[in-house]
Amino acid sequence: MSDPIIRFDDVTFTYAATDEPALHSISLDIQAGEYVAILGLNGAGKTTLGLCVNGVIPTMLGGNLEGKVTVAGLDVSEYPVREMAKIVGMVFDNPEFQMSQMSVAEEVALGLENAGVPYEDMKRIIPETLELVGLAGFEERSPLGLSGGQQQRLAIAAVLAMQPQVLIMDEPTSNLDPIGKQEVFDMAAKLNRERGMTVIVIEHEVEVMARYADRVIVLDSGRVVMNGTPQEIFSQVDALGELKLRVPEAARLAQLLAKQELWSGPVPIRTESAVEAVNELLGAHNV
Ligand SMILES: Nc1ncnc2c1ncn2[C@@H]1O[C@H](COP(=O)(O)OP(=O)(O)OP(=O)(O)O)[C@@H](O)[C@H]1O
Ligand SMILES: [Mg+2]
């Protein structure tokens, strides 16, 4: 296997003026082109993990970092955040707070200007990137007049304009309505599938992660406590319950049926497979 695009080598990070590490002895490899979901309760260390990848930790947010985080072969602690933004783009939960410009085009241009991209190139990159997120022709619109889903896609466009290899989304849809959520997840899946972009999503929407992610990493109190395929992780209904984490409804249904000895097959994690399973069950009972 080729070198991972992201490597955590025994990383422990403690924020300045705190005693407890926010991340504990994390060792982790993420391959280029993977779609990884990060799950965990509030305070588990999910955002901290993301900030270690984009280099904000340790470069801008102070604290004590032990071990080493490598992104595209570069040691993040030795690489300027501004340069790292060309490799890793990160978007947060509240798109409105990420908007600061008068027009959609200026919003996308901001990062490019900071990175010193020539105006001639910007004229090409801006429409290309807006096209990529389904906002073609929106250049002159006001960011604040967009729907939540459109604003989040604009925030994503602003980081994609830098042509990063990795896109990190930190609870990108928690302030969006169901349509906005769908827009953002569809777009991320498309970038992953069609462009081979490495996608890391910090997310509570387990149904969505069961559908899109290649891998699920569960954090608890700063430690990686589970790391596997969605099937491997979400079929552990009891273990996730002990961590106070949700599982897809399909998996919960299978578990309830199993407790009544009505189901003994593999645990479905998607609604469609649960429906198939229930149909089989009904067939077997001649219902
Ligand atoms: N800037 C900071 N300074 C000091 N401590 C911090 C800072 N940011 C986070 N922490 C602490 O680090 C730990 C991990 O926080 P983090 O924000 O990474 O968790 P999270 O999993 O993203 O939580 P949430 O689901 O609430 O976003 C928590 O104990 C938190 O209080
Ligand atoms: Mg967070």
Image (cartoon, rainbow, N blue to C red):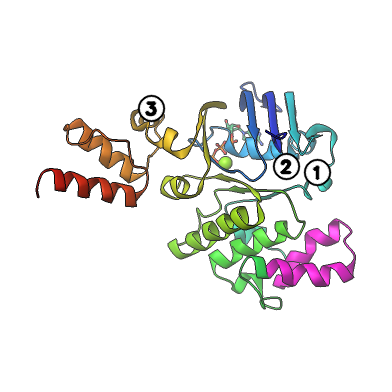
At x 21% / y 50%, what residue is drawn?
A: 279
| Residue receiving disc 2 | 54
| Residue receiving disc 1 | 81
The magenta stretch spans which residues? 101-130
Secondary element at image label 2: loop
Secondary element at image label 3: helix
Q: Does the magenta run of residues contain 112?
A: yes
At x 43% / y 33%, what residue is drawn?
A: 232
Whether pointer 2 and pointer 3 mark residues with C-beta atoms closer than 8 Å, the reply is no
Gap between marks 1 and 3 measured at Cα: 37 Å
State which mark lies toward you, 1 or 3: 3
214 relative to 106, above or below = above
Q: As shown in the figure, which amino acid type bears the numbered disc 2?
A: Asn
Sooner in the amino-acid sequence: mark 2 or mark 1: 2
- Residue 89 is situated, as x and y percent measured from the top left of the image, at 70, 50
Q: Nearer the viewer, residue 139 or 164?
A: 164
- Residue 139 is situated, as x and y percent measured from the top left of the image, at 71, 76
Q: As shown in the figure, which amino acid type bears the numbered disc 1?
A: Val
Of the numbered discs in the image, which one, if any, rests on residue 239?
3
Prevalent SS, magenta region: helix
